[in-house]
Image (tube, grey):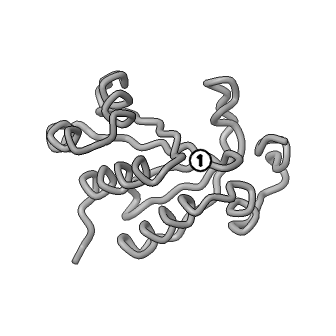
């Protein structure tokens, strides 16, 4: 059963239900990283967006710091989708960093259209290497306070 079928707009999941559905240490790894690095708590939000055959429809988990989005996670069974905006101000630094990223991340970055805001990147987080790419890109996007 898909995520959007388990939890419709009227039935909001809790964080444990999200974690159980995804059932991936990668989810916990990213959640812990974001909480510790940025001192943020995830917020659940419902999206009715149906692009990519419904991939974005349903409850998602948003991480924001000072009103600025770090990323949005979309639960899938065994993995998750991560949406991140790389703003125009970060593009040059991210482009330089791409050579140290996985081929998957490099291809995703190259194939993503450049908009007036920057680039919108949608990752399938299925392995440790992509998770590390994502963490590093988030660190470029928003420098943590030391």
Question: At 37% from the left edge and 41% from the top edge, which residue is drawn?
Answer: 85
Q: Which element carries disc 1, helix, strand or loop?
A: strand
Instruction: From the top left corner, tell me how far across and down residue 114 is, in percent.
Output: 30, 24
Between 50 and 102, the residue placed more toward the observer is 102
Q: Measured from the top left, where is residue 75 in percent x and y?
A: 65, 49
Quarter that holds the C terminus: bottom left
Which residue is rendered at x = 69% and y = 37% of the image?
57
Q: Where does residue 32 sit, x and y in percent of width and height? A: 48, 71
Q: Indicate whether 35 appears above or below 100.
A: below
Q: Residue at x 61, y 48 (%)?
A: 79
**At 68% from the left edge and 66% from the top edge, which residue is drawn?**
15
Q: How many numbered discs sit on the rendered protein? A: 1
Query: Looking at the figure, which quarter contains the N terminus?
Result: top right
Q: Position of residue 18 (x, y in %)?
A: 70, 59
Question: In the drawing, does residue 90 fall left or right of residue 135?
Answer: left
Q: Is 8 placed above or below 66 here?
A: above
Q: Is residue 104 left or right of residue 136?
A: right
When asked about the image quadrant of residue 52, the answer is top right
Q: Quadrant of residue 33?
A: bottom left
- Crowd class of label 1 (few under 14; some 14 to 19; many from 20; radius 10 Å): some
Rendered position, 125 above or below 92: below
Q: Nearer the viewer, residue 106 or 12?
A: 106
**Residue 12 falls in image quadrant:** bottom right
- The answer to whether residue 26 is left or right of residue 70 is right
Residue tagged 1: 80
């Amino acid at each position: 059963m898909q995520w959007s079928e388990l939890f419709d707009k009227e039935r909001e999941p809790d964080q444990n239900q999200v974690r159980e559905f995804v059932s991936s240490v990668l989810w916990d790894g990213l959640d812990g990283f974001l909480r510790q690095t940025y001192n943020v708590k995830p917020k659940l939000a419902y999206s009715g967006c149906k692009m990519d055959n419904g991939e974005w429809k349903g409850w998602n988990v948003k991480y924001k710091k000072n009103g600025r989005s770090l990323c949005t996670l979309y639960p899938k069974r065994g993995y998750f989708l991560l949406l991140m905006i790389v703003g125009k101000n970060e593009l040059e630094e991210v482009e330089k960093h791409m050579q140290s990223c996985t081929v998957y991340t490099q291809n995703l970055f190259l194939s993503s259209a450049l908009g007036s805001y920057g680039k919108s990147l949608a990752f399938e987080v299925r392995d440790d290497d992509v998770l590390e790419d994502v963490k590093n890109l988030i660190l470029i996007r928003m420098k943590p306070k030391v």
